[in-house]
Amino acid sequence: MGFLKRLGWYLVGLSIGLIFLVFFLKKKSGEGGIDFCYLPNCRVLKDMRSKPLTFSESLPEQYRDTMMIKAFLKDGDVDFGKSDTKSEPCKTYFIYHEIDGEAMELQAKNCEDSVEVESLQKSNE
């Protein structure tokens, strides 16, 4: 097999691979794109975002703002040292996020079919 023939087959394979790569990266960067969550923080928050929100009866009415809670679930930092990740049937997570220059702490129970927001308060950290 001559060099030019091998080079031709190489370029065909390379071009097919580039087409797949461009398609995949465009899908990832789009608005409804693909999320790659490899780290534990990202995986927990993504799982919680995929479930409906419920609010505890003890949570004050001013904190029952779904948009504020979604900000925690999108950009928050989970404190795994403080969280109870082994409890059954619902795991309890403490999520920190800065809102309007104030550090806030969200306590939520991640159950199999929903997320219950238990408390929202200023962080001590």
Image: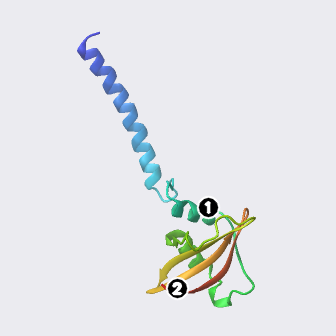
Find residue 26 and report its horizontal and vertical position in percent. 43, 49
Which quadrant would residue 67 be assigned to in this image?
bottom right
Question: How many discs mark residues in the rendered view?
Answer: 2
Mark 2 is surrounded, within 10 Å at the Cα level, by few (under 14), some (14 to 19) or many (20 or more) other residues, namely: some
- The residue beneath circle 2 is 123
Q: Rounded to the nearest whole Å, what is the CA distance between mark 1 and mark 2? A: 23 Å
In this view, the residue farthest toward the top is 1
In the image: residue 50, left or right of residue 124:
right
**Amino acid type shown at disc 1:** Asp
Nearer to us of marks 1 and 2 is 2
**Amino acid type shown at disc 2:** Ser
- How is the structure coloured here? rainbow
Which quadrant would residue 5 be assigned to in this image?
top left
Mark 1 is surrounded, within 10 Å at the Cα level, by few (under 14), some (14 to 19) or many (20 or more) other residues, namely: some
Find residue 100 and report its horizontal and vertical position in percent. 46, 86
- Give SS at disc 2: loop
Find residue 119 and report its horizontal and vertical position in percent. 65, 83
Q: Quadrant where the N terminus lies?
A: top left
Q: Residue 47 carries which label?
A: 1
